[in-house]
Structure formats: structure tokens, C-alpha cells
Image (cartoon, rainbow, N blue to C red):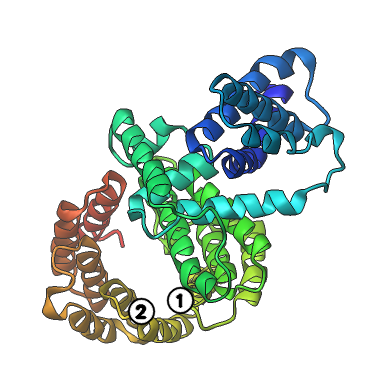
Amino acid sequence: MSDASRAVATAGQESFARIVAALIRVTGDWTLAEDCAQEALALAVERWPRDGVPANPGGWLMTVARNRAVDVLRRADVERRKLRELALLAEPEAAPADAGEGDVVDDRLRLIFTCCHPALALEARVALTLRTVCGVPTADIARAFLVSESTMTRRLTRAKTKIAQAGIPYRVPAGAALVERLPGVLGVLYLLFTRGHDADGEPAFADEAIRLTRLVEALLPGQPEVSGLLALFLFQHSRRAARRDAEGRLLTLDRQDRSRWDRAAVAEGVEALARAGQDGPYAIQAHIAACHATAPSSADTDWPAIAGWYDRLVERQPTPVVRLNRAVAHGYAYGPAAGLDLLDAARAGGALDGYPAALAVEAELTARQGDRARAVMLFRAAADLSDGPAERRALRDRADDLAEGRR
């Protein structure tokens, strides 16, 4: 990749949301804002290798996108007020680096809160955030959601139409409304991260979730759950390079080469965790992840501490999946029998019926009790229920290892 191409990629990542947010605020037209931002990037790809990278790449992109919006609105004979407001957008390359930054920052946060509005379906919020805030091409979003590009285009169009027709305000809520809305925004970021962090996910989505969570924390300081979510992402993502072997097989924590973990991400996670406190659900999950991320080896993992954190988490979120993970922690901290007892409790009422992870947990705890034959059967049953190819392969490999006495 050439220096100019790298500059376009960097400027696009840093400036796309700023440009789109500013143009939406002024024009109220989401599609126009996105199209103008994309056209500015396309023009940069064409011109920067020939003319050189401008001194202020983000300012250059903002100016091009703004001028394109002015042209479109003028040709459409849109009201003069909007044209006058567009003209007031500063010429960034001629302005000081910090000029108008408060307004731009507010615009980006407005955009995130609007995309994550609870009036929209959850998947629509994630898709709209990817497209409008992150600038991810519609084709890539469609592939992640396992739908055609035309289907995803229609979904995005419906989401934007609903924002317009329902009069969803383009603003960041304040006071009690912010407290009420923030968990929904964090939930979208969590789902976005999960879609990137899952075994068969798109890693770039996890990167975007981390970037946006850093942004939200910077723009909303003093919100401990934002810091907790950031810490959780960083601890989990720090293991990305070590999650698979040379043949692409998934590796459990105890088999990963910890020298390949991203120690800078772990250190940043520790700093974020210090800002998060100990009470919120994301903060508690981050403390659990920190026990893994900071342990020198698998044998040094503080399982009693992890079990204690899960005891706290299940009080806040008594879901079947949290109860399942608590059973794992207690199984490692206090023996497989303790874990299996908690697993039975988590399954009460059929809450985990047909869930492959529940069978995998039972299989692992059963293997640790010494019943390898039953564990092999359970691992294979879990593999048969799994939807993801990488996860299915890992479960079958674990069954084969046990059957052949390798571990």
C-alpha cells in the first residue's frame, strides 16, 4: 500500500463519522451525507497519489464533502437556509486544528445516539452504526448478517426513513434521559464487538467497536460502564493473534501462546478498568476478563476470584448464559462436581436446551471428573448442534483428543 493510500485509509477512518455527522445535522439528509463523504474519499483516492497528501487530510475531505452537498442542494433548489448553514461549516484546512472541535465532537456523539435509538430494531441499530458511523460498505455488512446487499440496502433505507418519519431527535440526551439511553448504546457496541470477536466473525467489526467505545468514553467522561465495556473489549481482543493455531484451529485459553497476546491492549484495559469501578455488569465482566488477561499462565489463573465475580454478576444479570459461565468458573475453582451442580441449576426449566455451549461445559467438567467416554459423547453432541464451522471443528477436535487419550 502506498503512502497516499494509507493516508486516505487513515483519514477516512478518523474523519468519516465527523463529516457524515456534520452534514446530517445541517441537511437532515442521511443518504446525502453518506454519499458526499464517500465521494470525498473516492476523490482522495484519485488525487492524493498524484497531487500529494494535503497538510490537513480530514479538513480536505470535509471541504470536498461540504462542497458536494452544496452542489446537490443547489441543483435540487433546496431552501436557502440550509445552504447558508452549510456555508458556515468552517473551511477546516484554513482553520486552527482545534477550531470548532466541540461542535464536531457533539455531532459524532449525536450520530451514535441516533443510530442506536431504541425505536429501531437491534440489528438495524448495529447495521446503521456500521454504515453511517464507521463507513463500512453495505456489501460487507450484508455478508456479516448473511443477507444479500440489496436486502441490507433496503433495511438501512427503512431505518433512515423511520428516523425521519418518527421524528427521532438528532441529539445526545441529557440528565436522566442519558442514563436511560446509554445502556442501549453500549448494548449495540457490545453486539458489534461480538460479531467481530466470535470464531467466525469479522475482526474489523471488533476493531470498530473498540474505536467507537474509546470515542464514547472520551466524549462522556465519568460514565463507569463505558470504561468497563472498553476494558472488557481490550482484554478479550488482546488474545486475537493467539486464538488459532497454524492450521486455523481454535485454541482454548490454556493452549494459547501468551507471548502472542497484545500486552499494550492489556495495559490499556487495566487503566480503563481502574476508571470503571466494580458495580456495573460490564465492569464485572471486565474484572473477570482481567483475571485471565493478567495471569502469567493458565495454571496461575485465579479461578476463585473469577467465581466470586460471577457470583456478583449473576445477582445483576441472572440469565441462563451467565449462570452457565458461573458453573464453569466454580468447576475450575472448587472442582467439577461443584460446577456440574451449578450447571444443573442453570438448566432448570429447559433454559439451556439445545444450546451447544451447555453441552460443551458439561463435557469438559465430565472429562475432569474422569469419565472420558461420556465426555467424548457430549463434545460430539455439542458439535452437531453448533452453527459455526470453526466452533464445530474445535469441539470435534476436543472429542477426538479425549478419545485418543491425548488430553
Q: Which mark is residue 281?
A: 1
In the picture, the quarter occupied by the N terminus is top right
In the rendered structure, the answer to whether residue 138 lies left or right of residue 320 reads right
In the rendered structure, the answer to whether residue 144 lies left or right of residue 100 reads left
Above or below, 106 relative to 336 = above
Q: State the image coordinates of residue 89 (x, y, percent, origin top left).
A: 73, 38
Residue type highlighted by circle 2:
Gln
Q: State the image coordinates of residue 166 (x, y, percent, origin top left).
A: 38, 52
Q: CA distance from mark 2 to mark 1?
A: 7 Å
Q: State the image coordinates of residue 307 (x, y, percent, origin top left).
A: 41, 83
Question: Are dots 2 and 1 in contact, CB under 8 Å?
Answer: yes
Q: State the image coordinates of residue 330 (x, y, percent, origin top left).
A: 35, 83
Rate crowding at label 2 as few (under 14), some (14 to 19) or many (20 or more) other CA atoms within 10 Å.
few
**Disc nearer the start of the sequence (2/1):** 1
Residue type highlighted by circle 1:
Pro
**Which residue is drawn at the image coordinates 86% and 33% (left, top)?**
94
Q: Which residue is mark 2?
A: 317
